[in-house]
Image: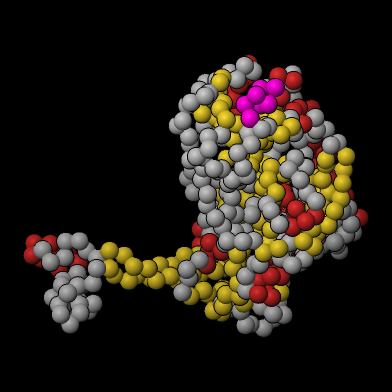
């Protein structure tokens, strides 16, 4: 073991010494092999140490501290008015809670039910346009703020105004009026790869600007929250409370993302931090500048991921893509010729790997514009153009379970042995008509339940063959060996479920 260690130390010594003897007046970048003190990790020619200092001297002035003041209502002292409590509070805390000497007592002598307090919190931000004073941060950093104060690395301060916010991506754009600002350029986050060296800069725990380093640990992370657009860059660079809204930069000093959240039980860094990618930021920022909000549209489809069973049942080459489970009437998707069962594989030239990808891609485009979409149908790839239109108001429609067990006939197909199907009752009147069969009973231990089927689901087709009634349903599932591919209506939504 000693010999390898000796060789490693010798190699490191040689690496450190070589650039010093080659040129004592410049630093040598380990990332690009060139003499460049402004990019990446380099060797300081005067001290002979590896350092990020030249890069950070150029980029850290673009990262700011954000102080937020918010007025909140809190319950008054529940014991106020009790003589013993009043005497106790006055004795130990003075007269601030003595009802006879309170300032917030109204003319009638009645006390306010709530007291107003000013809460203060800290976060980070990144100057994205020095000339116009634009500062990016997280929406959750400035949410409900009454006053936002920006502090630069040179200790200058300014009160910020909110240009616009987008809670669905957790992005906010602020503006300050100060001269001689320093900004940072946006990287192309589509070119980021796992293993890339990154640097996190922010106001960790509110103690002041802090720099940590790491690598890109993963891409495309999402918590699958339906009311948010997420495509996080995961990093092991330490991100702590107060880092929210701070910069994640690459070895060129370009902004790869905005630090947004961490995965931690303690509240401190566990090496799992997440940043909003720069390309998502760019699209949101443009609309915030133009409109003060993000004007998202829709294409009018319901989508889902492709499970291994669905891939087998549909005979797809891979699980990549977003499966269309529903096409809204008179929607852009219907007008473009998209159909239920199509698999979207590209959107404006970008590959679509799952339903999150298409959701984020559509959400990044301003309504009124057109996009190019590629999809698989019957084993062939097709391309069409589609408009992004304003989404209608959200509606909630739930199909109630039917408790009518008359005329039921259990399916004879083995994989669905735990589910009982029946013709759709006349009084059910589901969306889409009465063609198909409905699940009237289902055992939790059955393959059908495990695959995702539930009581009240309506089966509209089997292996792309339409179902009219119970006999046609049984006839179709009897034809197929292996996985069965079902088109299911659940309330106002349609989904695909495959059962082996």
Residue 470: say if magenta: yes
Residue 151 coordinates in the image, percent (x, y): 57, 73
Q: Nearer the viewer, residue 224 or 277?
A: 224
- The residue at 67%/83% (across/down) is 179
Q: Nearer the viewer, residue 247 or 132?
A: 132
How would you classify the magenta stretch by its main secondary structure?
Answer: helix
- The residue at 15%/68% (across/down) is 90
Q: Where are the magenta residues, as a range?
A: 469-475
Quadrant location of the C terminus in the rendered image: top right
Residue 97 visible, this orientation = yes
Q: Nearer the viewer, residue 88 or 407?
A: 407
Q: Nearer the viewer, residue 12 or 456?
A: 456
Quadrant location of the N terminus in the rendered image: top right
Please determine whether, in this image, residue 238 is positioned above or below residue 129: above
Q: Is residue 172 left or right of residue 219?
A: left
Q: Is residue 188 left or right of residue 76?
A: right
Residue 281 coordinates in the image, percent (x, y): 69, 62
């Amino acid at each position: 073991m000693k010999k390898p260690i000796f060789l490693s130390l010798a190699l490191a010594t040689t690496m450190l010494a070589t650039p010093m003897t080659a040129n004592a007046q410049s630093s040598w970048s380990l990332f690009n092999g060139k003499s460049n003190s402004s990019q990446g990790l380099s060797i300081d020619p005067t001290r002979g140490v590896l350092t990020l200092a030249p890069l950070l001297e150029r980029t850290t002035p673009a990262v700011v501290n954000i102080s937020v003041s918010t007025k909140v209502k809190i319950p008054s002292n529940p014991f106020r008015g009790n003589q013993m409590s009043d005497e106790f509070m006055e004795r130990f805390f003075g007269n601030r809670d003595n009802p006879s000497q309170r300032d917030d007592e109204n003319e009638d002598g009645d006390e306010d039910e709530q007291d107003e307090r000013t809460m203060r919190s800290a976060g980070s931000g990144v100057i994205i346009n020095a000339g116009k004073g634009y500062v990016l941060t997280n929406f959750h950093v400035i949410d409900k703020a009454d006053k936002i104060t920006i502090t630069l690395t040179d200790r200058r301060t300014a009160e910020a105004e909110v240009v616009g916010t987008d809670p669905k991506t957790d992005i906010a754009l602020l503006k300050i009026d100060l001269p001689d600002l320093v900004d940072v350029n946006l990287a192309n986050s589509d070119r980021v790869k796992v293993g890339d060296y990154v640097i996190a800069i922010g106001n960790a725990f509110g103690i002041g600007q802090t720099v940590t380093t790491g690598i890109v640990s993963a891409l495309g992370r999402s918590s699958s929250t339906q009311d948010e657009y997420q495509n996080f860059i995961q990093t092991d660079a330490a991100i702590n409370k107060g880092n929210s809204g701070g910069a994640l930069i690459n070895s060129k000093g370009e902004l790869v993302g905005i630090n947004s959240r961490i995965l931690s039980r303690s509240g401190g860094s566990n090496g799992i931090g997440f940043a909003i990618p720069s390309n998502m930021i760019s699209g949101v920022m443009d609309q915030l500048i133009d409109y003060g909000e993000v004007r998202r549209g829709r294409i009018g489809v319901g989508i889902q991921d492709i499970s291994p069973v669905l891939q087998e049942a549909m005979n797809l080459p891979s699980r990549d893509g977003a499966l269309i489970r529903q096409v809204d009437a008179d929607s852009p998707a219907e007008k473009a010729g998209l159909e239920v069962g199509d698999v979207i594989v590209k959107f404006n030239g970008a590959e679509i790997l799952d339903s999150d990808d298409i959701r984020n891609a559509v959400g990044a485009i301003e309504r009124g514009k057109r996009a190019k979409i590629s999809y698989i149908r019957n084993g062939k790839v097709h391309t069409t153009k589609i408009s992004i239109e304003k989404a209608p108001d959200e509606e909630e429609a739930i199909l109630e379970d039917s408790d009518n067990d008359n005329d039921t006939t259990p399916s004879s197909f083995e994989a669905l042995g735990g589910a009982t199907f029946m013709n759709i009752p006349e009084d059910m009147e589901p969306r889409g008509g009465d063609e198909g069969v409905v699940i009237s009973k289902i055992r939790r231990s059955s393959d059908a339940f495990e695959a995702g089927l539930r009581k009240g689901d309506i089966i509209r087709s089997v292996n792309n063959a339409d179902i009219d009634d119970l006999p046609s349903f049984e006839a179709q599932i009897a034809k197929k060996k292996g996985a069965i591919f079902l088109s299911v209506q659940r309330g106002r939504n349609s989904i695909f479920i495959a059962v082996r």
